[in-house]
Image: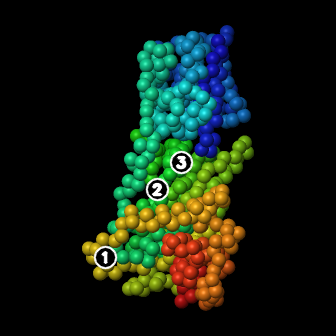
């Protein structure tokens, strides 16, 4: 008897329908075809144990299973439940007509219990797109899968629940979630706040500018000056995630298997902070079975790289493409996958190997050559993609001991949102352009025109500080953001002056 069950393969962050055809005929053997990997092939032993443990009969006949389409490689153990139900259906244990109504995914234990899978949200979206009535999924994944509307999602913990449900012996209740209510209920629930930061008003201002224009930022300062503390509060002043952004972000984390149990929808912007020993594959994504890397897990959020010069050179260089294109492409011999990577880079570093160059109280023991070699660990092309360079000076004891609270994140975020709205209106006819940091040279010429005074000031700064040609466009982009924050149609000289102050590493005189 020939029956079909349905599952899905996750490629990139999207799922593709997989049809599992099971045919039982005369003979004794077991064939699994359709480009399965070793984990899928091993499912025979898990299925055999799970079915026998629960007193389901496996026919002593020839069983042929085809996983179509055959040109897509099937990876992982998530097909166990799909295959097992297909075998029971072909053996006449389950009504064939019920199998066509549901997409079924899950990993089986030897006792028949069902373990969670990766990419449940992407698979649920694919199930809805193909018009399935419902999606049967492990109970641990039911929260993320139930986010998809117009699809009945059933969470199960044991194979007997699935069989009884399909036999109509014991009903299951679909899991319901009000996505919009859940989204707005948990929005912006951050435990950190900028009011915790004492002093550093100039740094907080620069971070506000970075958030308003989507600019990448690097902070240079001595140990203990507050770089990490400031960076960790950056998400609290970014505009809230839209529902579409929240779904896309959750989708990426679902594919990576990093959605926490009980979480349906990610409502906070991601903040990823990998250690400097990370490999290029872990940062960018890939591997034998490609998975999203840190740059994709930071999509719609922050990628924070602390101690930037300590990262391996090849690791830092792979950042260049996603910083420019906002996505990462991973090519393999059989296929190519693409992961979104639209993140803000926030980096921090010491000014020298000992960490105390330009410190107001402690002496630096490094030579100018050592400092220069340390800074040269960050290549020009990477630095070219960072709009704001900021020196962070340690806070004095008087400010640290002050009981006066700083400005809170909510107030700052409101100003950031206002500036973002101006940019959305400006770039509404330009697909893929949402913030000033994404402006092309053509858009810079159109929206960053300078009056005579501003042009003279910028020329003087370039000549005096030895600013590079690449700094020119960055200054214009940042000054456009500062003007938006002032609700000014034109860029003024004071906006240019502030933007020039955010190019520390481009100034020839910075090393004295």
> Which of the pair 164/66 is nearer the observer?
164
* Residue 282 visible in the shown view: no
> Which of the pair 39/217 is nearer the observer?
217
Q: Which residue is mark 1?
A: 400
Q: Which residue appears at 67% of the width and 79% of the height?
A: 469
> Which of the pair 155/23 is nearer the observer?
155
Mark 2 and mark 1: span between their CA atoms?
Answer: 30 Å
Badge 2 marks a residue whose secondary structure is: loop
**The N terminus sits in image quarter:** top right
* Residue 415 visible in the shown view: yes
Does 28 sit above or below residue 227? above
* Residue 492 location (% of width, % of height): 56, 81
Mark 2 and mark 3: span between their CA atoms?
Answer: 11 Å
Mark 1 and mark 3: span between their CA atoms?
Answer: 41 Å
Does 266 sit above or below residue 75? below
Q: Residues within 10 Å of mark 3 (few under 14, many from 20)?
A: few
Q: Which residue is mark 2?
A: 240
Would residue 290 be found to the left or right of residue 52 on screen?
right
Badge 1 marks a residue whose secondary structure is: helix
Tag nearer the camera, 1 or 3: 3
> Which of the pair 478/402 is nearer the observer?
478
Q: Which residue appears at 47% of the width and 69% of the height?
A: 208
Quadrant position of residue 203: bottom left
**The C terminus sits in image quarter:** bottom right
* Residue 292 location (% of width, % of height): 58, 49
Q: Which mark is residue 244?
A: 3
Tag nearer the camera, 2 or 1: 2
Q: Residues within 10 Å of mark 1 (few under 14, many from 20)?
A: few
């Amino acid at each position: 008897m020939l029956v079909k069950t349905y599952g899905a393969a996750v490629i990139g962050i999207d799922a593709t329908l997989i049809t599992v055809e099971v045919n039982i005929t005369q003979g004794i053997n077991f064939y699994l075809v359709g480009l399965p990997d070793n984990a899928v092939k091993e499912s025979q032993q898990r299925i055999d144990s799970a079915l026998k443990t629960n007193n389901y009969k496996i026919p002593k006949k020839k069983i042929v299973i085809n996983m179509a389409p055959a040109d897509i490689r099937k990876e992982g153990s998530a097909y166990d439940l799909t295959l097992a139900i297909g075998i029971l259906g072909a053996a006449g244990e389950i009504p064939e007509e019920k199998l066509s109504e549901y997409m079924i995914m899950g990993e089986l234990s030897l006792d028949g219990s069902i373990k969670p899978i990766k990419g449940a949200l992407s698979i649920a979206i694919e199930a809805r797109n193909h018009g399935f009535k419902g999606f049967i999924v492990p109970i641990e994944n039911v929260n993320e899968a139930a986010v998809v509307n117009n699809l009945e999602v059933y969470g199960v913990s044991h194979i007997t629940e699935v069989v009884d449900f399909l036999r109509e012996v014991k009903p299951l209740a679909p899991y319901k979630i009000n996505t919009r209510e859940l989204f707005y209920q948990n929005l912006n629930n951050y435990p950190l706040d900028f009011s915790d930061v004492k002093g550093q008003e100039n740094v907080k201002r620069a971070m506000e500018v970075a958030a308003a224009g989507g600019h990448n930022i690097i902070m240079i300062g001595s140990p203990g000056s507050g770089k990490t503390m400031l960076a960790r509060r950056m998400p609290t002043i970014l505009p809230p995630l839209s529902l579409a952004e929240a779904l896309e972000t959750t989708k990426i984390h679902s594919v990576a298997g990093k959605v926490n149990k009980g979480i349906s929808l990610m409502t906070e912007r991601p903040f990823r902070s990998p250690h400097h020993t990370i490999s290029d594959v872990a940062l960018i994504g890939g591997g034998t079975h490609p998975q999203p890397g840190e740059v994709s897990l930071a999509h719609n959020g922050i990628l924070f790289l602390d101690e930037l010069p300590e990262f391996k050179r090849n690791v830092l260089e792979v950042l260049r493409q996603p910083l420019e294109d906002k996505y990462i492409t991973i090519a393999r011999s059989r296929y190519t996958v693409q992961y979104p990577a639209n993140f803000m880079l926030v980096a921090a570093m010491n000014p020298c190997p000992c960490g105390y160059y330009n410190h107001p109280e402690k002496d630096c023991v490094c030579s100018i050559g050592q400092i220069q070699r340390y800074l040269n660990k960050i290549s020009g092309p990477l630095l070219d993609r960072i709009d704001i360079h900021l020196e962070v000076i340690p806070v004095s004891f008087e400010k640290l001991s002050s009981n006066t609270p700083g400005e809170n994140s909510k107030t700052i975020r409101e100003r950031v949102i206002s500036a973002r709205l101006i940019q959305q209106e400006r770039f509404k006819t330009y697909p893929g352009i949402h913030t000033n940091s994404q402006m092309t040279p053509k858009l810079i010429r159109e929206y960053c025109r300078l009056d005579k005074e501003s042009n003279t000031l910028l020329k003087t700064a370039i000549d005096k500080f030895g600013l590079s040609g690449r700094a020119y466009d960055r200054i214009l982009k940042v000054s456009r953001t500062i003007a938006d924050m002032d609700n000014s149609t034109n860029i003024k000289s004071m906006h240019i002056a502030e933007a020039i102050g955010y190019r520390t590493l481009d100034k020839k005189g910075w090393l004295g």
